[in-house]
Amino acid sequence: MKLILLGPPGSGKGTQAVRITQKYRVPHISTGDIFRSHIRRESALGLEVKNYLDQGLLVPDEVTVRIVENRLTEPDCQDGFLLDGFPRTLMQAKALDEGLQKLGKALTAVINLEVRNDTVIKRMAGRQICSGCGETYNLYFNKPQTEGICDKCNRALYTRSDDTEETIANRLRAYAGQTAPLIGYYSRKGLLVPVNGEQSADEVFNSVSGALKLGFL
Ligand code: AP5
Ligand code: MG
C-alpha cells in the first residue's frame, strides 16, 4: 500500500492517517509533523522552516522533497507508506513520481478528502492536541471528558500555533493556489479516490477502506 492523503488543511488527514496506518500497517509520514518536531528540537531544519509554518506558507519544495526522499528510503517504507500532507505542489508530485520510479515503486492510490471551507475552518479553530500522546480532540466535534485534559493519558491539551484566524486564512489560500491542482493531476493518472470528508471520522474511514478494497487491492 503506497498511499497519499490529499485534502485541505483541517480536512482530517491526520485523523484518518492514524486509522489507515493501524489497519494497513504502513508508516505514517506527515511532513507537517516532521517539521513541527524539528521546530520543537530547535534543529537547523526547524529554524529554517519555522517562519513558513508560523505564517501558514508552504516550505520551499527543495527542502520538503529532500526530507521525504530520505524518509522513503528507510527500511520501514519498503512495503508501503502513507504520505500525509505531501505532495502539496505539482513540483513535489513530479519529484515523488521520479523518486518512486528510481526505487522501482508505484503509488497505489491518492485519497482525496473532500470537505467544505466552512467545515475545515471550524475543525481547525476547535482543534486541541494532547501534549503527552498526541491524541487530537475538537471543541465542536469531539470534546475531551474534562476540559483541557486528555482522556487517554491525563496530560494537558494545547492548541497548534498555526490554528489562528490569520494563519488559517493563509493555509487555505496556499491550498487553493498550490495544492488543489494535484486533484486533476492524480485524477488524470487514474489514482484519485474521492471521499466525502464531511461524514464522522469513523464513517470517513469506512468509505476509505471500502474504496481501497474495491478498486485498489
Ligand atoms: P500540516 O501539519 O500538514 O497541516 P495541514 O495540511 O494544514 O493539515 P492539518 O494537520 O491542519 O489538518 P488535518 O487534515 O491533518 O486534520 P486533522 O485530522 O488534524 O502542515 C502544516 C504546515 O507545514 C503547512 O502549513 C506548511 O507550512 C508546512 N508543510 C507541511 N507539508 C508541507 C509540504 N508538503 N510542502 C510545503 N510545506 C509543507 O483534523 C482537524 C480537526 O478536525 C481535529 O480537531 C479533528 O479532531 C477534527 N476532525 C477530523 N476529522 C473529523 C471528522 N470527520 N468530523 C469531525 N471532526 C473531525
Ligand atoms: Mg495533520
Image: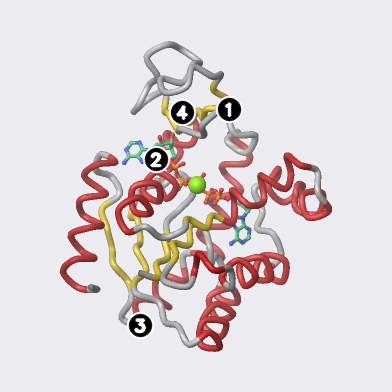
Q: Are marks 3 and 2 in contact (CB under 8 Å)?
A: no
* Ligand 1 neighbours mark 1 (CB distance < 8 Å): no
Using the image, determine if residue 64 lies above or below residue 100: above
Residue corresponding to mark 4 = 126
**C-alpha distance separating marks 2 and 1:** 27 Å
Residue at left offset 46%, top offset 65%: 180
Residue 7 position, x and y percent, is 42, 56
Q: Are marks 4 and 2 in contact (CB under 8 Å)?
A: no
How many numbered circles does the render carry?
4
Q: Quadrant of residue 186?
A: bottom left
Residue 65 position, x and y percent, is 65, 70
Query: Which mark is first along the chain, 2 or 4?
Result: 2
**Mark 1 surroundings: few (<14), some (14-19) or many (≥20) residues within 10 A:** some
Query: Which mark is first along the chain, 3 or 4?
Result: 4
Residue 116 position, x and y percent, is 35, 47
Q: Is residue 144 left or right of residue 156?
A: left
Kindly identify the amino acid type of the residue bearing the numbered disc 4.
Gly
Residue at left offset 54%, top offset 22%: 157
Q: Secondary structure at mark 4?
A: loop
Residue at left offset 54%, top offset 65%: 88
Q: Secondary structure at mark 1?
A: loop
Query: Which mark is first along the chain, 4 or 1?
Result: 4
Kindly identify the amino acid type of the residue bearing the numbered disc 3.
Arg
Q: Secondary structure at mark 2?
A: helix
Q: Is residue 187 left or right of residue 163?
A: left
Q: Secondary structure at mark 3?
A: helix
**C-alpha distance separating marks 3 and 2:** 28 Å
Q: Are marks 3 and 1 in contact (CB under 8 Å)?
A: no
Residue 12 tag number: none
Residue 118 tag number: 2
Marks 3 and 1: which is nearer the front? 1
